[in-house]
Image (cartoon, rainbow, N blue to C red):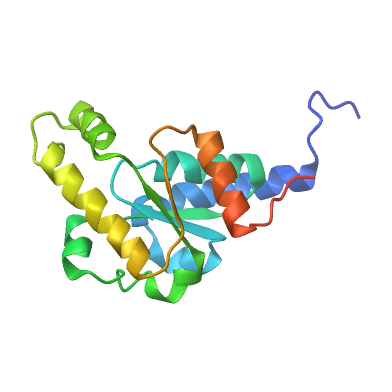
Amino acid sequence: MHRTHSIHEKSYDFRIDAVNYALMNDDGGNIKNFSEADIILIGVSRSGKTPTSLYLALQYGIKAANYPITEEDLDNEGLPKCLVPYKHKLFGLTIDPERLAAIRHRRMANSKYASIKQCRIEVREVEMLYKRHKIAYFNSTHHSVEEISAKILIETDLERRKY
């Protein structure tokens, strides 16, 4: 039987399962499945969690969930309770406040959410959270999703499901 693409069936299955997992577990939408995650990306809204999760899934078959750290989470100073059992799976993303404000402004212009003041507060607080809980993190500001993913793979020793 002739194949038009040189993809191994096992690799394909891992990758499709991982993509479906990433989509179902985007933005903290399904925290009951976090036990199945290979990694859980955390960070403020618009820091690159979703595209990175999908890239890790599509390219490497890694089940990557993601969870947004909200202003409410930051007010409590601790890790959100749903993340505590999975601390060993957490990897943080951060971003320069100016870049974050520009990205958010395109979504919700002239809002508190997009204000430079709000972005500075959230980024400062989330980075303090990472340090306080010894969570590895990476600044995504000047990096492509491929570079962010490579950094995560290097720092976490995740198993790549490529054959």
How many circles with numbers are drawn on the protein? 0
Left or right placement of residue 154 versus residue 108 in this view: right
Can I make out residue 110 in this image? yes
Q: Quadrant of the N terminus?
A: top right
Q: Is residue 120 above or below residue 91?
A: above
Question: Residue at position x 29%, y 49% from top?
Answer: 44
Q: What residue lies at 16% left-to-right and 65% top-to-bottom? A: 75
Camera-side residue: 127 or 51?
A: 127
Report x, y in % for residue 141.
38, 36
* Image quarter in which the C terminus is found: top right
Q: Is residue 79 left or right of residue 53?
A: left
Residues 23 and 38: in front is 38
Q: Position of residue 51 (x, y in %)?
A: 45, 38
Q: Residue furthest right?
A: 1
Residue that appears at 33% across and 69% down: 132
Q: Residue at x 77, y 48 (%)?
A: 10
Taking the image as drawn, is residue 69 in sight? Answer: no
Residue farthest to the bottom? 85
Expressed as whole percent of the image width and height from the top left, the position of residue 67 reads 36, 56
User: Where in the figure is residue 117, as x and y percent of width and height?
Assistant: 11, 42
